Amino acid sequence: MPRLLPFLCALAVAACGEREKAAPGAPAPGTTLAGRIDKVDGIAVVRVRGTPKEMGTQAGTLLKEQIRILLRDYLGAVLPEDRTLVMLAARQMEVHIPARYREEMRAPAEAAGVPYDDVLVGNVMVELFQQCSTAVVRGPRAEGGTLLFGRNLDFPPEGSLEKHSVVIEYAPTDGRRFVAVTWPGLVGVLSGMNRDGLCVANLLAVSADTSLDGCPYMFLLRDVMEGSGTVEEGLALLRESRRTTANSIMLADAKGAAVAETSHQEMAVREIEDDRLFATNDFRADTDVRCDRYDTLAELVAGAKAPLGVADMERLLDAVDLGDINVQCMVLIPARRELRVSLGRIPAAKGPFVVLRPWD
């Protein structure tokens, strides 16, 4: 049985470096703006701008082949041949996705010549199967006092996912510019940083308080990226949202950090304490489920004899990566609006890391 099916069935039943020459993208009919792809030490940095439809068309045009490959190979590997239950779950969540993001999903589907339903499923299924780790240090625990945000994204690659990670820089007509570390065809955000230096990442957790009657988390984090400049503003947006499953959301800016432990109806916040904060695939506020990776992170940081620098954070993430499903790893530095990313290999936490400063 495809590995994602038990998650979807349960929900359905419950519901009922060096820059190379840029490659310009061709604008779609009726579109006056064109995106482009830069290669930075082998990592594809896709730059899109404009309205949701314009950005979706640019991304779909530039990443056409990758979108086709991922939807064919990855969805084919993880989903059943009969997708009735999958589409039932996707459609129930779709009505809660803001119209501008639905429009943005339709645009790359059209530009890449793929079914919209496949793009929709790709955008709502990701949050159901993550096993990730995050760590934040600042002040005396961080070299130079500069806050560091470390993030592992562990997700079954099925022989294709690890090959196609991209970094997309969005410059929306309405909203803050931001960067997402993502995959072609995804419109929401799993890991990102905006122009103000606010960073976000989500991690699947365990709770009985789940529902399809809400907005998928990737789109909530997209809202945070476009609409919030601080941790406090991001938390306020999450409190007001209509959510689905259980997720821990790590947020950090240049000054501080917090974890929002969210489910369909509940939300608890853990503030940074003793200049360190961690989140893995469990809730610490009120649950009996405990993740060993959380304890490992806490012990390693507590035992550090000196403040942690960027290389130390990379080693910390490597200590808790999940091996053959560790498909992305990054260290975000909000004060410098800098990302250090390792993509395209497994485990990603082994590096090497590429430095990106998208707003320089």
Image (tube, helix red, strand yellow):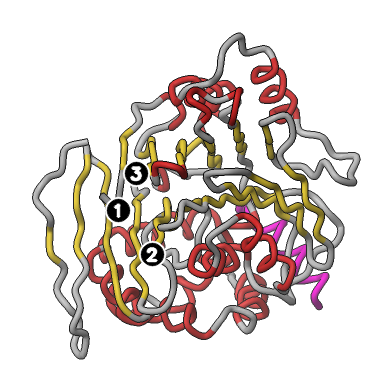
Q: Residue at x 61, y 50 (%)?
A: 251
Q: Residue at x 22, y 37 (%)?
A: 41
Give the magenta part as a residue range. 2-16
Q: Main secondary structure of the magenta part?
A: helix
Closer to the eye: label 3 or 1: 1
Measured Cα–Cα span from mark 1 to mark 2: 9 Å
Dot 2 amino acid type: Arg
Q: Is residue 164 left or right of residue 35?
A: right
Element marked by disc 1: loop
Q: Residue at x 53, y 70 (%)?
A: 227
Q: Is residue 137 left or right of residue 166?
A: right
Question: Which residue is disc 2 drawn over?
Answer: 177
In magenta segment, residue 12: yes
Circle 1/circle 2 CB separation < 8 Å: yes
Quick one: label 1, few (<14), some, or many (20+) residues within 10 Å? few
The disc label shown at residue 359, or none: 1
Dot 3 amino acid type: Lys
Query: Looking at the picture, how far across and down is residue 352, in whole percent?
Result: 34, 27
Query: Looking at the picture, how far across and down is residue 233, in whole percent?
Result: 63, 63
In magenta segment, residue 196: no
Q: Nearer the viewer, residue 39 or 277?
A: 277
First of labels 3, 1 by sequence position: 3
Query: Looking at the picture, how far across and down is residue 215, in whole percent?
Result: 65, 73
Dot 1 amino acid type: Trp
Quick one: label 2, few (<14), some, or many (20+) residues within 10 Å? some
Circle 2/circle 3 CB separation < 8 Å: no
